[in-house]
Amino acid sequence: MRKVKSALTALLLAVISFVSVIPFWFMFSMSTYKSELIFQGTPIFPSDYFGENLKTIFASNFVQSYGNSLFISIVSMLISVIICAMVGYAMNVYQFRFKKGLHLFIMMTMMVPSQIGIIGYMIEMRNMGLNTTLWPMIFTWFANGFGAYWMISFIQSSLPLELVESARIDGASEVKIFRSIVIPCIRPGLLTLCLLIFLWSWNNYMIPLVFVNNANNYTIPIFIKSLASAYRTDSGAQLAGLTLATIPLLALFIVGSKSFIKGLTAGAVKG
Amino acid sequence: MKNKANKYKGFWPAFFLAPFCICFLVFNLFPILYSFYMSFLDWNGYSEKVFVGFENYINIFTKDTTFWTSLVNTVKIGIVGFPIAIILGLIFAAMICNLKRFKNLLQTVNFLPYITTPVAIGMIFTFIFEKHVGFLNRLIEALGGEAINFIGSPVWAPFVISFMIIWKCTGYYMAMYLAGITSISDDVYEAARIDGANNVQTFFRITIPLLKPVTIFLIITSAIYAFQLFDEPNLLFTNQSSSTVGGPGQSCLTMVWNFYNQAFGANPRMGYASALSCLLFLIIVVVSLIGLRLMNGKEEA
């Protein structure tokens, strides 16, 4: 009885995992077909057209779009993480008025999505003359509510305040303490937040959709979309592009999957 | 000693908090306030702005049926999708939490959908559910059934989107519940076992009640996520040659898609769209306030 039960459990888990993974396989396998042939048969096994599809996307501005996406994600990630770490440090080390209010406020900002103010944001960027650059897609990650919340709780649990105290007695300046004591102490937390911001900005769809108005500013999602037109949709090429776009995420995820999942689940479970 | 403490009161907290506060004011708060101001205007993006007072809001509630359609669609898609994803996540978490091997592997594999680019999800699901060539319909036909036009029918299309949500979120919710289960002390389970409780009883009497904070958190965040739904429905219909807004019969027009279409579509109505976004803001704030209340109440108890 027990054996049957555990066999059933194993089977069910296998089916679930299969459902999770099979679309990835489809994506990869279909990207090796010529568009017109994708639907001739069921593309379960890879074919030999991957190189041609790559040629198609490289001939169009895939490389530039990829570079744009990388630039946006890396800059957003670095700056946002530093800003959030600074908030985390201030909220844990100092006592000041309105601290409780500020904490509640950060909790609230976590809930409000950036899409809400996108019209105002677009007009603001247009007036600043930045609406034809990549910056609108970067600025939006700077004051990230979740990041601030995550850094506050991470620093609370992993930075011994005595360390800060003794550094002060030794005469170190606040900036120096932050840079050479706090940052090394909270490295795992910083790494998790880096992964998350990278993921979110890499996958972001709506903000580029609003702001990208010429082919030089394409991000990956917009580039893939641009391959579909009313006349011919080159699905093979689209999927080849998506396969290449998924690689950095998969690599990051496999390298840091533990801290990644830990970061994402941190909101619900304290500690 | 007191002097020293004072030194850390004024300048330094401000120094470390300033970047966040300034960026928040400039890139988040100001745009929302500006949208609020815009919601009292009639403006197509380039012509003269006309102040119309509450007309936009009145139109949304009285004249324009698309607002109500989009509200109903959003709630429908969300109510079908998220509860199933949450329940499945809980069950799977309970199933794999005691596994000795493969636990991490299963968690990682099932987490993959969550990190996938929405564009890819949209395309893959189009391929799976498409009428003539889609994988699922080929399977149905091979089994002797008749192909169903999932994506082209106003009845089925919202379910496809709910299914996309389930596919995307189940692994994430599972990871959340796993983290929750790990934090439950083993002693509790030990005591239950000694008292003679079986697995099913333990699950319903111990695991579920102790995971209540996680469940509340997931319900709130998924409710907020539901009101933001845009990527999945929009991308499901991207590769269709006809550029329909909202899918077949507008059955997949979510609130954000409606907002997006009013603001940046063929016939932009910035003021009207701003009013829509302000209503959306109000809904999300109310939902999250109720949520915070529930969570904090839990902590005090």
Image (cartoon, coloured by chain):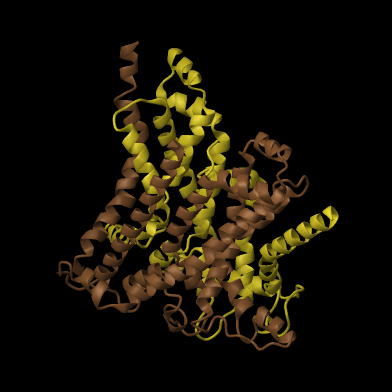
Q: With respect to residue A58, does B266 lie above or below? A: below
Q: Does residue B38 appear in the picture of this structure?
A: yes
Percent across and percent down for residue B54 are 17, 67
- Taking the image as shown, residue B35 lies to the left or right of residue B70, namely left
Q: With respect to residue B73, does A254 lie above or below? A: above
* Count of marks overlaid on the render: 0
Percent across and percent down for residue B231 are 48, 67
Q: Residue furthest front?
A: B195
Depth order, front residue of B30/A15: A15
Residue at 64% x, 47% y: name it: A257
Percent across and percent down for residue B206 are 62, 44
Q: With respect to residue B149, does A172 lie above or below? A: above
Which of the chains is brown? B
Depth order, front residue of A26/B74: B74
The quarter of the image holding the N terminus of chain A is: bottom right
Q: With respect to residue A181, does B128 lie above or below? A: below
Q: Does residue B171 appear in the picture of this structure?
A: no
- Taking the image as shown, residue A85 lies to the left or right of residue B285, namely right
Percent across and percent down for residue B57 are 23, 68
Residue B115, quarter of picture: bottom right
Residue at 46% x, 28% y: name it: A178
The quarter of the image holding the C terminus of chain A is: top right
Which of the chains is yellow? A
Residue at 54% x, 74% y: name it: B159
Depth order, front residue of A201/B96: B96
Depth order, front residue of B291/A76: B291
